[in-house]
Amino acid sequence: MDFTHDEEQQALREAVRGLVSKRYSDYENRRRTVADDPGYDRDLWQKLAEMGVLGLPFAEDDGGVGAGPIEVGIVAEELGRVLAPEPFLAAVVLAGGLVADVGTPEQRSELIAPLAAGDSLLAFAHAEAGSRWAATASAVTATAAGDGWVLSGS
């Protein structure tokens, strides 16, 4: 079995590595970024979107790139290499993946393209502090507000 990356995968690795290394080669830059609101670099997030990185795991019909798990893993590895605080795993892989897998066509259309473009972030509210991975969210409440919902809790 051959586990080497092809030329496109290697180019993706080099592009992401070059981008995140510029921002986080100095640990103090990372420390300042994490300390400031929102806890990640919005400019870097937008550059990742422009490169197509945020749309990698999503179907082209939903506004994504249509790549596979190997490409997503390459990006995750490069972000992890510099401890980049960008919410790639939480927003793209976990929350975006959930929408891509079980969302209706309307939900995918409404949520995936803006996420891939870097215009929105998704969050999957699935674990409460102190819940020890119990599958409950008893301290979180959802209240109807206009045409949507407001979640309260942590």
Image (cartoon, rainbow, N blue to C red):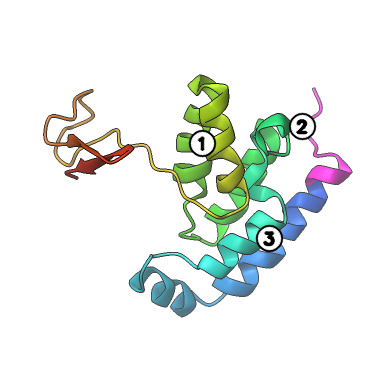
Task: Report the residue at 47% width, 52% height from top.
Answer: 87
123 sits to left or right of 97: left
Q: Is residue 16 above or below residue 143?
A: below
- Asked whether residue 5 is drawn in magenta, I would say yes
The label nearer to you, 3 versus 2, is 3
Residue that badge 3 annotates = 17
**Location of the C terminus (image quadrant):** top left
In what element is the residue under mark 1?
helix
Q: Of marks 3 and 2, which one's residue comes earlier in the chain? A: 2
Classify 10 Å Cα crowding around label 1: few (below 14), some (14-19), many (20 and above): many
Q: Position of residue 89 (x, y in %)?
A: 49, 43
Q: Are marks 1 and 2 in contact (CB under 8 Å)?
A: no
- The amino acid pointed to by label 3 is Arg
Which label is found at residue 3? Answer: 2
In primary-sequence order, the first of circles 1 and 3 is 3
Q: Residue furthest front?
A: 146
Contact, mark 3 vs mark 2 (Cβ under 8 Å): no
**Circle 2 sits in a helix, a strand or a loop, which is it?**
loop
**Observer-nearest of 45 and 17:** 45
Residues at marks 1 and 3 touching, judged by CB atoms closer than 8 Å: no
Query: Residue 96 shows which numbered tag?
Result: 1
Which range is magenta? 1-9
